[in-house]
Amino acid sequence: MSTLAATSPVDSYYAASAHPFTGLPALAGEMRCDVCIIGGGITGLSSALELAERGFEVVVLEGRTIGWGASGRSGGQVIAGYACEIATLAQLTNRADAQQLWDMSLEAVALVQQRVTRYAIDCDWRAGQLHVAIKPRQVAELARYQASLAEDYGYSNLEWLEGAALAAHIASPRYLAGLFDPRAGHLHPLNFTVGLAQAARAAGVRIYENSLALRVTRGATPVVHTALGQVHARQLVFAGNASLGRLVPELDARIMPVGTYIIASEPLGAARAQALLPSDAAVTDSNFVLDYFRRSADHRLLFGGRVSYSGITPPDLAASMRRRMVAVFPSLADVRVDYAWGGFVDITINRAPHFGRLESNLYFAQGFSGHGMAITGLAGRLMAEAIAGDASRLDVFARIPHRTFPGGRWLRTPSLMLAMLYYRLRDVL
């Protein structure tokens, strides 16, 4: 589920199982375009694709390689909604905006599937996602959530599961109930991201890898400076999320990088993998520090979870994640872990996405808070719409208020670690 920016150059399972993709050159020299996009993940590539198909001349600058960060390392779960509850968005904005935000999250899920089909992206798309409860308190919360979506927002697609109905989706004694969404799903995130890059290039987008944006000169014609070149553009899109760092201080102050991690088991074989998750649905639990998992196309279990607010990768990562996996599926006690990797999700204080404009020609989207696999694609579309002249839908997101993290750049990490102790304790109780 989470969007992960890499914490180290160690290859993930996705990198090991990715389709071949010819590397792209680094930017060298000076060039001009209508729109320059910083970030070669799903947000940036979606924006580039939408703009190119509207006739704009677009350049994308990626600091490493396409999908190297968040977009190519995530849990791969494509889910409606946001990291915060829709009720929270109604409180932060208003009821009408909350309805539109919910509807756009459904559009985001559909957009992923539409792009997979339209551009023939081979990324192992599978339909179905399951949200499960561990404790009676969480069962009641899930029931309220289902009722609210149906009664308040007109979404009645969620199927309530208990007992044998739940067991038809997941073979684990850990869970008491679940909500199944047949419209959500999961995919291979790196292959999807690379597929978007190929579609964007076919539409005329110029993409440069290993072209880290070092400095931006703002003004009527912004200039992005890399080690070997410059891009002059009429409009600029910041789509680097947690990887932007101090490039844009006013954006950096409103997000916090938090580490989270994934393992891939050894291949289990088709029968054993299917026995664990018979419907091939992706799964997330209801804890604040949640577990999320799904089957891969080659019959592994991909299992994610844990968080590190310090930014330091936990010791013995594979072993600690394996213990979490076996707690969910005791039958995997004999199974080895072949891959372990992790990275950063960029969270906001309220866990709502942070989209908008810094100036009339500077656009941004960040703060997906671990819920970005679908919403990143929508963010790219909304920024393209705004650049093309209609900012009405981007402005719905821009109306969500966002505060800076207390303590500044150096004290926000210990402040957040203290604040999260409450939620860790609540998961246990």
Image (cartoon, rainbow, N blue to C red):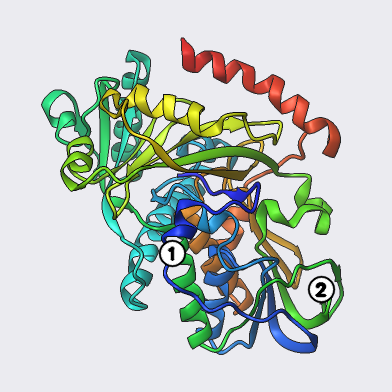
Residue matched to label 1 = 18
Left or right of 427? Residue 413 is right
Calculate the distance from the C-alpha at mark 1 to the C-alpha at mark 2. 28 Å
The front one of 232 and 192 is 192
Which amino acid type is marked by label 1? Ala
Whichever of labels 1 and 2 marks the residue nearer the N terminus, that label is: 1
Neighbour class for label 2 at 10 Å: few (<14), some, many (≥20)?
A: many
Residue matched to label 2 = 226
Could you say whether the residue bearing mark 1 is in a helix, strand or loop? loop
Which amino acid type is marked by label 2? Thr
Q: Are marks 1 and 2 in contact (CB under 8 Å)?
A: no
Whether residue 100 is visible, yes or no, is yes
Residue drawn at (81%, 57%), measured in percent from left and top?
248
- Residue 373 at x, y percent in the picture: 47, 54
Residue drawn at (49%, 50%), measured in percent from left and top?
74
Left or right of 149? Residue 209 is right
**The N terminus lies in which quarter of the figure?**
top left
Whether residue 355 is visible, yes or no, is no
Residue 103: image quadrant is: bottom left
Residue drawn at (85%, 35%), measured in percent from left and top?
410
- Residue 372 at x, y percent in the picture: 51, 51
The front one of 280 and 404 is 280
